[in-house]
Image (cartoon, rainbow, N blue to C red):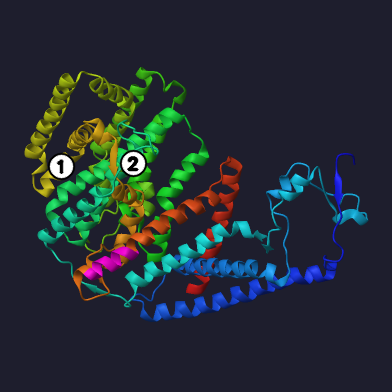
Amino acid sequence: RAGYRPVAADAASSPPRDASKGMALLPHLACVAAASGALAAYRFLLIWMGSISEYTDYTAAQLGVAVAYGLAIAAWFGVEVGVFLSPRLGYGGVPSSEDAGLKGIKVASESGGEDASVLTTEDESSRDSISPPEPVIFGIRSSGLAALRAAAEFSAIMGYVYLCDRTTLFAKGPKTVSPTMFWGLCAAVLTVGLCTLRLAGKKGEVVTAPLQRDQTEEWKGWMQLQFIFYHYFAEGEIYNAIRLYIAAYVWMTGFGNFSYYYIRKDFTLPRFMQMMWRLNFFVAFVCVTMNNEYMLYYIAAMHTFFTWGVFFTCWIGHQYNDNNAVCLLKIAAATGVTVLLYDVPGVFHAVFKPTAGLLGFHDPLHPEFTDSLHEWFFRSGLDHFVWIFGMLCAYSFPWYDRQLQAIEDMPSGKRALAKAAVIGSALAVGGWYVHTYFLRPKREYNKVHPYTSWIPIAVFLVLRNATAGLRARYMHLFTWCGKVTLETYILQFHIWMKSTGINGSPKFLMVWLPSFWLNMAVVSAVYFVLSYRVFKITVVLRDVAVPKDNRGIFVNSVIMAVATAAFYAVGVALKG
């Protein structure tokens, strides 16, 4: 074995084999004991929650997912205890998975001789780079605890969601309808946002390209804050503006996804499944836990559907996407399909009737709507064209970027005149839109919204990117909020406000403290922290559940399908 220097095991310090097995057994026994204790505590917690629950007739899915939450918490706690106690009980574990692949490392066990426990290396530096052994509890390495921790934390958050909105533990109160308070709060938040102005790009680098990620996240963030304030204060007077905000979100679905597929040319299954996980993981568990229908959280359904629309538009004939004529033809074809689906009577219901079990909605506040697909048709129909405008904007982005750069390259006087002309034209178009369409009453506005929402979006894009200084800066507060819009949208129903019940809207405020502003501050702090945590958990579990290879996705899909069926069967058995 030339080139290898044997490193003899220290017989004096190595425990006998039987003692090693005993040391390995103790952390496993501690794991079982801790998990059993966690399950017992969880059972008592469920009994207590049931005693204060506003509902006593649980579905099989609710019972099944409650069992899944309990097992996730117990598994995490047990393994956490086992890993924690392993080195303290003398169990060193096994070599880490990274060390197993180090070049030049061999465990001379093939011979089965006396030197089977001898570790040999090419040189001293390779041996010194080896990490300490890694505790393994029931096949779970300590390095794999992140996923268990995320699952347990998620389970606890879902329990908190139920506790807030389905039990009598927290009081509910009426909303305070006050335009003064609403606009005052918006102004205060904007002031704070301005204090968080930052330069786009890396430190020391000034980036003036339009529609940077920080800018679009900022856009999402301030719209989302006004959107949830609109619900909190029941500020119905800005309904038309809220409709435009939702249209802007859908525009970003078209713009962002088309940009990705057009530039990256990545139509792989892992990337698509990761996007679907991001959009639907959290809402799926909320629906099951709260016994709500998917369409209550229609934003998730809309973004999912229009993401599919962008994907198929780009994927069909994707080898010709660099051909301008073909690309525009595909966008035109998507427009034609959209017109057929939404604007030709009968087509929409014929197409979506098989999906009524998923997309149907039974609104307890509007029993007069007997068509279960009414909500889906109404919500998605309001924005059924703007995602196509988003694709057009993404396709035209290089041209737009060149025009802005051409203006910046002009002499100062000519540049100022060009910018003034652009800003003036945008303001004129915006003023015309407001006068002609935006100020219409709610029902009248809804009729023209699908065909006109692209106008104010275009105006905003021009004004927000009119100068290099505007393009180079963003408000970090709103950018941060823009990263968690899906989570804040869903959680506002249940932990920031309180809904009217199953499939109910958030018509009440969560009341912890008698002072309105102090109560809002405390409840909001919890609400935003948990929204951020759910966002991070979604990413951690996505990386585990949706690997980057097709075979791994298939295997995990089968495992998740079997687990879902098993927990549902348990729920059916518990329901009796």
| Dot 2: element | helix
Cβ–Cβ under 8 Å for marks 2 and 1: no
Residue 521 colored in magenta in the image? yes
460 and 322: which one is in front? Answer: 460
Q: Residues within 10 Å of mark 1 (few under 14, many from 20)?
A: few
Q: Position of residue 420 (x, y in %)?
A: 13, 27
269 and 378: which one is in front? Answer: 269
**Mark 2 or 1 closer to N-term?**
2
Q: Position of residue 388 (x, y in %)?
A: 30, 33
Q: Is residue 235 visible?
A: no
260 and 117: which one is in front? Answer: 117
Q: How many marks?
A: 2
Q: Main secondary structure of the magenta part?
A: helix
116 and 274: which one is in front? Answer: 116
> Where is residue 126, by image quadrant?
top right
| Dot 1: element | helix
Q: Amino acid at mark 1?
A: Lys
Q: Amino acid at mark 2?
A: Asp
Instruction: Specify the label residue 447 is tagged with.
Output: 1
Q: Is residue 498 left or right of residue 14?
A: left
Read off the residue under disc 2: 214
Q: Position of residue 345 (x, y in %)?
A: 24, 39
Tell me the residue at 61%/42% (across/down).
551
Q: Is residue 408 left or right of residue 27?
A: left
Q: Which residues are magenta?
A: 518-526
Q: Is residue 283 visible?
A: yes
> Where is residue 565, by image quadrant?
bottom right
